[in-house]
Amino acid sequence: MDVARLAGVSQKTVSRVFNDEPYVSADVRRRVLDAAEELGYRPNNAARALASGRTRSIGVVTLGTALYGPASLIMGVERAARDTGYALRVVNTMEGDPAGVAGAVESLLDQGVDGIVISEPIDEGHEGDLSARLDMPVLVLGAPPILAPRALAAGTGADLMARTATEHLLELGHTTVHHLAGPQRWYAARDRVEGWRAALTAHGRTVPPVVEGDWSAASGYAAGRELASDGEVTAVFAANDDMAIGLIRALAEAGRRVPEDVSVVGFDDIPVAAYVSPPLTTMRQPFDAVAQEGLKRLVHAIENPQALPLAASDPPVDLVIRSSTAPPSTRTTPGRGRSAASRSSEGRHSPPMDGGASHHD
């Protein structure tokens, strides 16, 4: 066999690699796959599916959006899937679609997938209809697990990240923190409100009214014009970086300096966050890590149906401290400011002159 000869292994080893059997080292597996690619060889998936009872495909349900968070998570899933030996079949849903997740899942079930990833961040109210039909492993990303017997969850923990962002501002000396929230139909937006409110309540601080945006910089700008008129506002936690950037623009136009007059924290750590003026303090989301761990757990559940599911690890809480946060100018808290700065290290995307990433676990 040409693949075995080029890879320097036996035909039996090639068969094990193509059938994704255990007891093959990572180096040997890579050599076989590289040889197969070089020769243009493709295993007969139809025959392999008949023999194993599996199609070696995973269905993905995702909201059709270009927003950074959901798009980055799906890109992470695609990257993670490359090393699993499973093909992905993606079905996009649209916000407000009455069929929603249930219709997308039905389409994937008709295609005979072995497992399903649901990366649907919006509460459409139809998820309960799925439980009776899903008797295969299902991985839910960034949302509560559905009522299915073999459901797994990953990408949770936004409430803890939001609490960390809020506590950073309180530690700097701000008496309270205002929140620019995302649309409340989104699970992520609700989780961030919950974490922000929990931090303020735990510290005995006033909980201001929530200002709701729609994830866009334009909605952040509109909220910023509203918040800039309130002289009591000295700190704002925005539920994503785009809204934070729009907010900063509105504050600047109103003569409210960031961070001298108002400190701002975002969420996501989008690539441009380190290069806006001022560079944005933000919560970095571990999209690739979530996708890799989630896919690993899903494939384990597919291939070991009688085994207990792999345990999920706690998501990292990664606060990237840059120049958009500081102690409030109306109070003299140099010691607190130095303490916060001393916990910082160079951020991954930050220019050299800025503060870096402070890791809170």
Image (tube, rainbow, N blue to C red):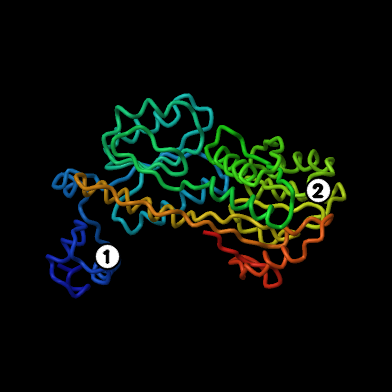
Residue 66 in the image: x percent, y percent? 56, 44
**85 w.r.t. 348: above or below:** above
Q: Amino acid at mark 2?
A: Leu
**27 w.r.t. 94: above or below:** below
Residue 43 in the image: x percent, y percent? 22, 56
Q: Residue at x 46, y 52 (%)?
A: 75
Q: Residue at x 48, y 24 (%)?
A: 98
Mark 2 or mark 1: whose residue is earlier in sequence: 1
Q: Secondary structure at mark 1?
A: helix
Q: Nearer the viewer, residue 166 or 333?
A: 333
Query: Which callout, 2 or 1, points to the residue nearer the camera?
Result: 2
Q: Secondary structure at mark 2?
A: helix
Q: Residues within 10 Å of mark 2 (few under 14, many from 20)?
A: many
Q: Residue at x 71, y 35 (%)?
A: 209
* Residue 231 position by quadrant: top right
Marker disc for residue 247: none
Residue annotated with mark 2: 251
Residues tagged 2 and 1 counted as in contact (Cβ below 8 A): no
Q: Is residue 108 left or right of residue 251?
A: left
Residue 203 in the image: x percent, y percent? 64, 47
Q: Is residue 79 left or right of residue 172?
A: left
* Residue 83 position by quadrant: bottom left
Residue annotated with mark 1: 33
